[in-house]
Image: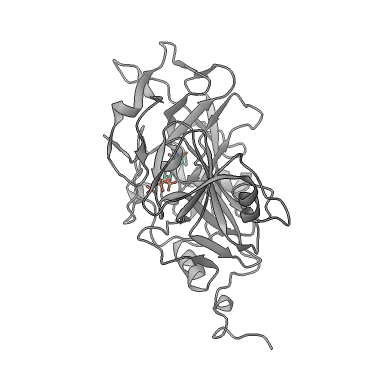
């Protein structure tokens, strides 16, 4: 005999078989209610965002020899057993050193129904600190992707690249979106949305494969200031401390050259801003992807999720720039003013979130210009 909804709360959560979209805040709450998201203990305030759920670190961290993917049939726990060099508690906080790889079991695990997949990404605050973070699930061949119907734990792989960071049980470095069906707007839908909502404030927007986003190297009048380069050998950043650090202790302001170019040094980390103001209307979510995976000289952002309402005038965000986390790879690379660095891929929400970005949810980056992470005092 099949269980009734009273016996199995999972049966109370359903999405239509032909539905396409990203699940909004209240459906994430409903998933947790129905036992499809299993937090070790209750969610904290603002953990559920308009189109994503923040994931929390558990109470133990493992330093491992190298990053890994478990692959089919293997669990992350088995791989940790083989690869761990050291195990330590995060109950009272601990420092993660640069260029070491750590694995931390997360407080949230999943029991996804067959029609829902999950995709993880670092939070913008994590990306802006150059903390390389990915989510790993059991049996997976891909980082940050959690397949339909996945039942099991989640782990964060963390490797701070520039600053050593202090993390604790409950720290939120990653976020996850839940999706059903195919939510990405096709070319015609994207054209129509841009025509009605003006997704970027340029007249000749390039909408091939997403909305092109370019870098602003025009320079502030008088100073030529365009952004920041991270300093090396700095103090530790506590990821849970807001406005706790002086900018000059961690960042060096940089200016473009008079011709509007900037030479990226290999291995250095930069925070720059987009030339375009960008926006995400309330019924959509976006993700910044590399503009061309074949251009490997530099990389923008690893934190790519843009929330519904980001930059949206109705949520107080008009004029918001995309903040770009930029790193050059093997060779010095010249960035030019207006060079395309990424594309915003827009997806449909399954329904409009109850709260948009910037509304009552402690958003840090609404209507931002060139903005360092929330840890630094302005
Ligand atoms: O590469 C990126 C990624 C995101 N954003 C913007 C859009 C996004 O909607 C906002 C907040 O991102 P996220 O929710 O990941 O940041 P957070 O660290 O959780 O901050 P908050 O507490 O403000 O949500 O930052 C960027 O400017 N650049």
Q: Vertically, is 198 above or below 170?
A: above
Quadrant of the rendered image containing residue 17: bottom right
Quadrant of the rendered image containing residue 73: bottom right
- Name which residue lies at 60% across and 39% down: 65
205 vs 45, left or right, is right
**Camera-side residue of 62 and 125:** 62
256 vs 206, left or right, is left
- Name which residue lies at 42% across and 56% down: 49
Q: Residue furthest bottom?
A: 1
According to the image, what is the colour scheme of the structure?
one colour
Q: Residue furthest right?
A: 72
333 vs 242, left or right, is right
In which quadrant is the C terminus drawn?
top left
Query: Percent x, y for residue 279?
Result: 43, 43
Would residue 202 be seen by someone viewing this image from the given angle? no
**Camera-side residue of 320 and 9:** 9
Total numbered badges shown on the rendered structure: 0
**Camera-side residue of 355 and 173:** 173
Rendered-image quarter of ligand 1: top left
Quadrant of the rendered image containing residue 181: bottom right
Query: Percent x, y for residue 97?
Result: 45, 36
Q: Residue furthest top?
A: 258
Q: Vertically, is 43 above or below 143?
A: below
In which quadrant is the N terminus drawn?
bottom right
Query: Percent x, y for residue 72?
Result: 73, 54
**Camera-side residue of 103 and 180:** 103
Query: Percent x, y for residue 184?
Result: 60, 50
- Name which residue lies at 71% across and 51% down: 71
Would residue 321 be seen by someone viewing this image from the given angle? yes
- Name which residue lies at 66% across and 29% down: 294
């Amino acid at each position: 005999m099949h269980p009734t909804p009273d016996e199995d709360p999972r049966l109370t959560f359903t999405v239509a078989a032909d539905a396409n979209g990203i699940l909004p805040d209240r459906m994430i709450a409903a998933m947790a209610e129905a036992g499809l998201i299993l937090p070790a203990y209750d969610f904290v305030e603002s953990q559920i965002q308009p189109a994503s759920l923040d994931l929390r670190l558990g109470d133990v961290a493992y330093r491992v020899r190298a990053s890994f993917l478990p692959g089919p049939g293997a669990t992350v726990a088995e791989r940790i057993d083989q690869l761990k060099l050291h195990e330590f508690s995060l109950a009272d906080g601990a420092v993660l050193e640069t260029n070491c790889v750590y694995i931390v079991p997360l407080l949230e695990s999943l029991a996804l129904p067959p029609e829902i997949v999950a995709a993880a990404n670092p939070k913008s605050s994590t990306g802006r600190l150059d903390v390389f973070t990915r989510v790993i699930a059991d049996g997976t061949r891909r980082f940050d992707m959690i397949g339909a119907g996945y039942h099991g734990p989640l782990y964060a792989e963390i490797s701070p690249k520039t600053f050593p960071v202090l993390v604790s049980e409950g720290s939120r470095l990653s976020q996850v979106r839940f999706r059903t069906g195919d939510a990405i707007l096709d070319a015609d839908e994207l054209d129509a949305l841009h025509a009605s909502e003006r997704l970027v404030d340029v007249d000749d927007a390039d909408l091939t494969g997403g909305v092109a986003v370019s870098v602003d190297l025009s320079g502030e009048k008088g100073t030529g200031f365009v952004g920041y380069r991270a300093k090396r050998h700095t103090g530790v950043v506590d990821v849970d401390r807001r406005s706790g650090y002086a900018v000059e202790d961690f960042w060096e302001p940089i200016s473009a050259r008079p011709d509007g170019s900037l030479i990226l040094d290999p291995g250095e980390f930069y925070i720059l801003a987009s030339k375009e103001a960008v926006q995400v209307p309330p019924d959509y979510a976006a993700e910044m992807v590399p503009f061309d995976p074949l251009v490997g000289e530099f990389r923008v952002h690893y934190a790519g999720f843009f929330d519904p309402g980001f930059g949206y005038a109705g949520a107080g965000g008009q004029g918001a720039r995309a903040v770009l986390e930029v790193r050059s790879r093997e060779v010095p690379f010249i960035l030019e003013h207006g060079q395309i660095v990424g594309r915003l891929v827009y997806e449909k929400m399954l329904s409009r979130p109850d709260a948009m970005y910037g509304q009552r949810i402690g958003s840090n980056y609404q209507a931002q210009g060139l903005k360092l992470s929330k840890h630094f005092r302005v």
